[in-house]
Image (spheres, helix red, strand yellow):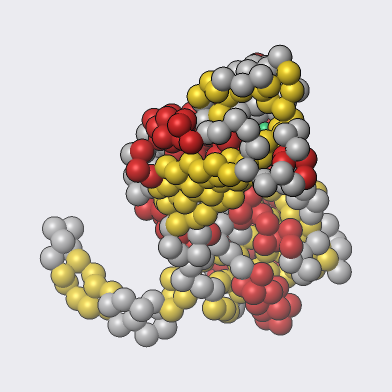
């Protein structure tokens, strides 16, 4: 017997006030939808995932989400319907006899955990229909249309309902068929089962398992993935060979020398290490992923241009760069006189105060390939933080 998870992700993002539908917005370097799918991909209890997305996005989702992130359990990417319920109904048409349990989970609840999925599957096997949720903690009041309190509602037995919701196949299929026949639309899947007179049991979800609806939820999500502090550190390393007939450029400063660094761009080893530190902190991979050296657009380009793109990417992903520290390792020439200009170049491209950028220089004491003057290496770290105004 198999378990299938149906994930509707057909929203248009009107409430987020953004151009992109919210399931595609980036959170800690990945689309929200990818965060949502990963716990299902990882769970040993889930065999297949059916994903329902807007009709025009089918190809893009198959390529940029399912293939790119190796989501091998996504066996169907289907066109969603007008309402969420229509999307789930479309997906249910493809559920097979071997699927004994069907989970339904919102595409924009990226903080679902393996434990929650496990409880939902176990609950459905045991009692046929379960909904995840948390008991309401806040006092609940009812008001009239003018906002005046007309009563305090007892919160005994009240739950705030989340997904996943999980069902035995026959239970959810019967409920959706009946709802379709009656033209009934519910606010969740369990409500369709409830109106059949079938008991639905609540099982504990988690207060983190929110639906990303408003921009503040994205902010909360970044903190969730950052371990709560909103701060992230990144590390970068690079090395290039020193050869004749190339200019030596370090930190965007041309340095008089008989040799220069070999590379596809200007081979500014310091800037490359700084780019990697920032990209690493932002969860955006590295300079090779962002600017492939097979791309003629980057031939002999000033690495400061790459650094500027890294700054833009980082900002687009909701992060602000706080500081950079770095070291160049090079046997000769002496770099002391140029270090502050390098730091100023980096600070100016990153649009942070020069006091937040440090560039140091070392020799390798004659040891190894760098010591023999065959090349240069650079190391950098960068601290970035969640931008409060993404
Ligand atoms: Mg490099």
Front one among 186 and 157: 157
- Could you tell me residue 275's position as x and y percent? 56, 37
Q: Is residue 228 above or below residue 157?
A: above
- Could you tell me residue 42's position as x and y percent? 74, 62
List the single residue furthest toward the bottom: 156
> Can the viewer see residue 124 in this picture?
no
Front one among 304 and 314: 304
Q: Quadrant of the C terminus?
A: top left
Q: Which of the 4 image quarters holds residue 236?
A: top right
Front one among 79 and 349: 349
Q: At 60% from the left edge and 30% from the top edge, which residue is drawn?
A: 333
Q: At 65% from the left edge and 37% from the top edge, which residue is drawn?
A: 331
- Could you tell me residue 336's position as x and y percent? 48, 36
> Can the viewer see residue 69 in this picture?
yes
Q: At 33% from the left edge and 39% from the top edge, which residue is drawn?
A: 353
Q: At 52% from the left edge and 54% from the top edge, which residue is drawn?
A: 233
Front one among 163 and 324: 324
């Amino acid at each position: 017997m198999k378990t299938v998870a149906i994930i509707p992700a057909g929203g248009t993002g009107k409430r987020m006030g953004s151009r992109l539908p919210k399931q595609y917005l980036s959170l800690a370097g990945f689309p929200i939808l990818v965060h949502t799918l990963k716990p299902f991909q990882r769970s040993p209890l889930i065999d297949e995932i059916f994903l329902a997305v807007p009709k025009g996005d089918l190809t893009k989702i198959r390529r940029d989400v399912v293939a790119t992130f190796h989501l091998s359990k996504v066996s169907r990417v289907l066109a969603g319907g007008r309402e969420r319920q229509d999307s789930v109904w479309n997906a249910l048409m493809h559920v097979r006899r071997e699927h004994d349990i069907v989970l339904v989970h919102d595409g924009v609840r990226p903080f679902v955990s393996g434990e929650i999925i496990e409880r939902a599957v176990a609950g459905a096997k045991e009692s046929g229909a379960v909904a995840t949720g948390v008991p309401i903690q806040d006092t609940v009041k009812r008001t009239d249309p003018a906002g005046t309190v007309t009563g305090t509602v007892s919160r005994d037995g009240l739950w705030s309902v989340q997904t996943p919701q999980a069902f035995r196949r026959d239970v959810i299929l019967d409920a959706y068929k009946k709802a379709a026949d009656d033209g009934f639309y519910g606010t969740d899947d369990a409500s369709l089962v409830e109106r059949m007179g079938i008991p639905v049991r609540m099982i504990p979800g988690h207060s983190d398992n929110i639906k990303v609806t408003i921009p503040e939820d994205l902010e909360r999500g970044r903190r969730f993935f950052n371990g709560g502090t909103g701060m992230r550190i990144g590390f970068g390393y690079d090395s290039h060979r020193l050869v004749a007939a190339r200019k030596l450029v370090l930190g965007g400063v041309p340095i008089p020398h008989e040799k220069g660094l070999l590379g596809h761009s200007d081979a500014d080893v310091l800037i490359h290490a700084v780019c990697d530190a920032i990209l690493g902190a932002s969860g955006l991979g590295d300079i090779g992923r962002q600017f492939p050296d097979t791309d003629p657009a980057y031939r002999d380009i000033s690495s400061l241009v790459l650094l500027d793109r890294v700054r833009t990417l980082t900002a687009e992903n909701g992060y602000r760069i706080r500081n950079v520290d770095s070291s160049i390792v090079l046997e000769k020439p002496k770099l002391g006189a140029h270090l502050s200009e390098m730091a100023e170049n980096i600070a100016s491209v990153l649009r942070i105060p020069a006091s937040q950028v440090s560039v140091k220089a070392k020799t390798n004491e004659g040891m190894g390939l760098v010591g023999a003057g065959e090349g240069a290496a650079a190391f950098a770290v960068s601290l970035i933080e969640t931008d409060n105004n993404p």
